[in-house]
Each structure stands twice: as C-alpha cells, then as structure tokens.
Amino acid sequence: MYAKVIVDITHEKLDKIFEYSIPGELEGMLKVGTEVLVPFGRGNREMRGYVVGFSDVPEYAPEQIKEILKCEEDKRAIESKLVALAAWMKETYGGTMIQALKTVLPIKTIKKTIKKKRIRLLLTKEEGKERMDFYLNKNQKARARVLAGLLEQPEQEYGLLTKKLNISPSVINALKEQGVLEITEEQAFRNPVKYQKKEEKEVLFTPEQKNAADTFKRDYDSGQFGTYLLYGVTGSGKTEVYMEMIQHVVKKGRQAIVLIPEIALTYQTVLRFYGKFGERVSILNSRLSGGERSDQIERVKNGEVDVMIGPRSALFTPFKDLGLIVIDEEHEAAYKSEQVPRYHARETAIMRGKLENASVVLGSATPSLEAYYRCEKGEYTRLTLARRAARQALPSVYVTDMREELKRGNRSILSDRLKGLMNDRLKMGQQIMLFLNRRGYAGFVSCRSCGYVVKCPHCDVSLSSHKNGMLVCHYCGYEIRAVKKCPSCGSSYMGGFKAGTEAIEELIKREFPDAGVLRMDMDTTRTKEGHERILSAFADGEADILIGTQMIVKGHDFPNVTLVGILAADMSLYGDDYRSAERTFALLTQAAGRAGRGSIKGEVVIQTYNPEHYSIEKAAAQDYEGFYEKEMDYRRIMGYPPAAELLAVLVTGEDEKLLDTAVRYLKEFALRAGRNKDLQIIGPASPFVGKVNDIYRRVIYIKSKDYSALTVMKDHMEQYIEMNKGFQTLKIQFDFNPMNIF
C-alpha cells in the first residue's frame, strides 16, 4: 500500500501531495488525517506530514518511492482532525485535496510581530532608597524619578513608564547598565475586541429556555454529542441559551465556536458574549488585518481563547478540545461557500463535531427547510422557544396591497399607512427601521397593477429579464420575448423594481426633514468598522430612522424600535430560484421581529403587490409550521431539496464554442453514467449572468432522491473530465443543493 501525504501545507512551495510507501509495521495503523514523519528532499530531512489518501498502485517507480518513517500514534494534533475534515469536504463537495486543505488550514503569512517591553526593578527597597539618595545628591533627577516610580511599582510597561515620567531611552539604558533594572520583551498579540466588560446582569430564564439548556447539558454530560435545532420566535432569548450551553462546555475545559452569518452581527453579538466571558472571547472575520487574524490563531493555540465568534471561516478555528459549535441564524445562505469546495457550514460543522466529539446547536426563528426536515426525520433534536423571553407580545403586522395604493393615485414607495405610522412614532420619540428587500433580485418582471409575475412553465421560477429583450429561465433555458402588456389583466404597468437604499434615503429626508436618518448598505459599510459605527449610533439614539438591506434585520436588538416598514416584499419572492419563497418568508419574519423588543408593542407594515402569496401570509402571521407544510408540498412536486437532492455543475471558459461543446459532451456522459438510475438531468443552460470578465458560463442540474447517487455521479464526472484533454482550459465546479442559482 502507498500513502498520499501532504507535507507542511502552510508553505506555498510544498503545496502538493507526495507519495510514500507504508512499511509493514505501520500497515493497518494509518488513516486519513494521521500525522506521520517522512524523509523529504535530497537530504532526507525529517518532516511532519498528514496522510490524505491511499492507493495500492504507485504513480512512480516503486524503487523511487521513500518509506514513511513513523506515525505519531499518540499525538492527537488538531491539524490531524482538520486534515480529516478536509478529506471529507473533498469527497463530499468536489474540488482537489489542496483546495480543501487551504480552506481548513490557511497558508502561513509572515506578519510583523509586536513586542511588549517591560521594566523590572532589580534592587531591594533599602538598596533602591540608597541609590535614589545618591542620584539626588548628584542632581541626576531623571534617574531618581525612574527609581521612585519603580519603588512604588517594581514592574511596569516600558512605554507607559517612559511616557508618564517623560524619560528618554538613554536614561533607562544607563540604569540597566548599572544593574538597577532589567528590560524584558514578550510577544504581544493584537486583540480586535475592544469592548469594556460591563457588570453582567443576572439572567432569569423562562421555563422554555431552562428546559432547552438543561436538555443539552444532560445529553452532554452523558456523552451524547448530537445536533440540536433551537427553534425560537424572534426575541425568545436564543442567545442567552447559547451562552448557558457554552458556559457549561467551558467549565469542562473545552472550547466553543459561534458562527454568525454576517460581519454586521459581530458588534452586538460580541458585546453580549464579552459581558460573560471577557477577554476569553475573540473574533475572526475578513475585516481583520492579516496581523490580527494571525494573532487570534496564536492566542487560540496558546489556550488564551475559549469562545471564537465569526462568519463561516471561523468554523476552522484550531481549538485543541472543541466541545460545541453554535450556528446562529442557521437558515442564512451566507453559510454556503461560493468558492471550491462549495461546502455548507451546517453539514461541515456536524462532521467536525463527529471528529471532535462535540455537539452542534443550530438556531433560528425561521429554520431552513433542511434543518426542520431532519428534525422531522429524527436526525436532529428540536428545542423550542415559542414565546419571547420578556413576555412581550409579538408585533402587530399589517399587509398593505400596493396595487390598491396605485389605484388611489399613490405612486410613492411609501404607503399611506406606513407614512402615517412613521409620523406617529417620530412624535413619540420612538425609532423606525425601513427594510428594502433587495435580496434575491434577479431582474424578474411583474405587473404593478395586478401583481402577475412572468414565470417558467417548466420550473416554477420567475423568468429573468435580459438586455436583449428576452425573458429567460436559468434552470432549463426556456425563453420568450419580453412581455409589454400583462397577460393577466392587460395593464401596461409591466416592469421591475428599480429603487435603491440611496433613493429611499433621499425620499425619507424630504418627507421627514426633522428626522435623523442613517443608511446601512454595502456602500456605507465598506470601512473596517462601518457596521459597528452605524449600529452603535442607532443604538445610542443618534438617529430616528435606519434604512437598510437585509443586513439590518438579522439578530439586532434595539428596544426603542417600535415600527418596521418592509418595502417591496415581492423583491425576493420572485428571484429565479426555487428557494425564493423560503427566503422571502425568513426575511419578512426576521424583519418583523425587530419591532417591539422593548416595553412597547411593535407594529410592522409589509408592502407587497401579492398579498395572497402564502409566504407573505404566513410571515405576517408568524406561522413557520404552516409555511413549512405548504412549501414542502411544492418541493415534493418539483423535486427540489430537501424533498430531493440537487447537484449543479458550473462550467466556465473563455472560448464560448469550446464551452458549449464541452457541456454537451458532459451532459451526454451524465446521461450514459446515470442510465438505470433515478436521475433527472436538466440543461445545459446559461446562468443569469452568462459572461463575466470575458468568461462564459454554463450550468447543468442533476436531481435525485439519493444524495449518494449524486456524489457517485460527481466522482464519475471528475474522472471523465480528468481523462479528456478538451476540458483542461475550462473551470468546472460542483455544488450540492446550491443556496443560490448560478
């Protein structure tokens, strides 16, 4: 047998897999992820490596292959577990082993280290007083000042002492030469968490919160490390339950990872966790500098961090004894990677939990259909929080039909009801959030008079408007000419929704000139602390109205917000994606949940051109179970996840003719390989954006009720691609159960 070994992934030059023979005494002892020592290079220097695969047929002449020296049998290095996780990701999601390894073990970058200098007095008190008298007699006042400071506090930071006493380095060096003091240096780590720890308030748990936490603790203490869905309405206190679970794990000497879907959630999340765990909390996200990221990893390895908070990539924090992974707002599409391997953080966290004997807790007020479906099948344990933690009532929700507003001559983006409620709230000094539902927008065409949307007759998704005047389905390629008149009511009000957050901000400032207005979108949050600056200003009451896209409706808690206006609820409803109804329900429910989290009951206005759609009706009623049943009926009929499994194969290349030939051959191969199997193959079709930076794009979809049938098909297709040179200039990605249509 031969082992595939990756040698020090942290350096670019060794970024490939090497082959070694397995000596007889190690046969049966090695597995994927095992740490081994191997001879490397001309000098056969011993290097550490990790087994990433096996083969009984060598790629090189057997006499040229070196032998593994030994395996670190007793060493349970965290890298071994992460390598095993990478191997699982490669098999499950496609791509190369190197791509998977780079996802879980980032390349080392050399960053400037920060040194912290300290000064320590070497004399006794009596000796110090004698020396100080000597300095004063000699009129050496600067030296005397330093000595007086050190007699008061024998060890101090170099910078603070010299600054406080206005002393030059030459004075310190002279005292060092005389044996009065010593200067020590230690590495200082950058800490991106800059919050002051406040006195922690005692939390009084509701019976539901206590039951959820106790169920987790009981299972954990008995060695049952499972997956839980913490399903709780908005404001039900899921975060308090997370913290209680984490504290239980930390007390046992283990660590926890808390995943959040977006950087925008970092500010309030860390503030709450910092109050409980102090400096044992840290963050990892893309807004940190390279030095800050590197230092957090070092702090983790040094055992200085118990809780890591961050978006998807924080899942790979190299904790030595990981005990719990929490995925907050688990329904969010942000947990699906857009880079190869296109992994989903939920499934990957569950696999890491199995490798580490850790539990996984998924939390949401609007769980993904996948998570709820697995609860129904008994794969996850459901913990339910049906009431708000402080017993506040859920907000009153009004659905406004914008077709009626148009008939009354109101062409504004604000309905009369929303405008009136905004005036009332501003008079009472309460705050307002206006959510522009831009998510999932892909150029759909609708009638503003009756709400009709042009859809594909074959795929039950909206057709997307293209600049060439065609309406196209991005699943099957069906297309028709752009519709000028509504096929349903004959109206000529056919078109898309064009307003953005900036235009709405201008309108609000005109309508309410005395109100303080903040806007939160991609433009206003580009800077490193953009999210934190806007959210803290709104929390401190510096503005009356906060306007934003989906980043303002997730997980934020502003007690003075009593009104939420949802503009254009239909925008995400008719994206060209089978998940559009699910996304719309989640966004509307989450947005509505921002209102009335304080002592005053909240109100919500949902503005829509299609108030009869079940996702809008169920969101207004905060009825997740009703929505789940209705949506699952559609998924079963159409064969979409989680009722069935879906594999998307995205092929891109510079030569359009070659690309079209390649995807045709790839589909023909898939049809042959899938013969006698219950597979449905759709496409190839051009995605919504068929060309990006002169790179053309095509996609094939494969459906099956059996996930393993799709992974087998992926393996067959990868082998077919590798054997045919025509695919060498093309880039091919596999995406299982994609969160977004390409």
Image: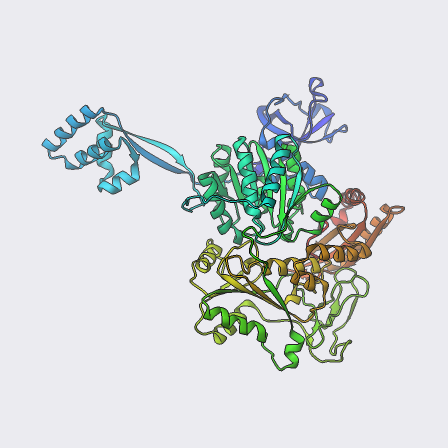
Residue 577 placement, left or right of 36: right
The residue located at (14%, 31%) in the rendering is: 135
Quadrant hosting residue 64: top right
Residue 657: x percent and y percent? 76, 59
Residue 389: x percent and y percent? 56, 50
Q: Is residue 43 visible?
A: no
Quadrant hosting residue 179: top left
The residue located at (54%, 74%) in the rendering is: 420
Residue 392: x percent and y percent? 55, 56
Asked if residue 308 is positioned above or below residue 429 in the image, the reply reads above
Which residue occupies the foreground of this view, 501 or 427? 427
How is the model colour-coded? rainbow
Quadrant containing the C terminus in the rendered view: bottom right
Which residue occupies the foreground of this view, 359 or 669? 359
Q: Residue furthest left?
A: 137
Quadrant containing the N terminus in the rendered view: top right
Residue 271: x percent and y percent? 47, 48
Q: Residue furthest bottom?
A: 409
Residue 497 placement, left or right of 161: right
Residue 525 placement, left or right of 381: left
Q: Is residue 557 visible?
A: yes
Q: Residue furthest right?
A: 676
Which residue occupies the foreground of this view, 194 or 340? 194
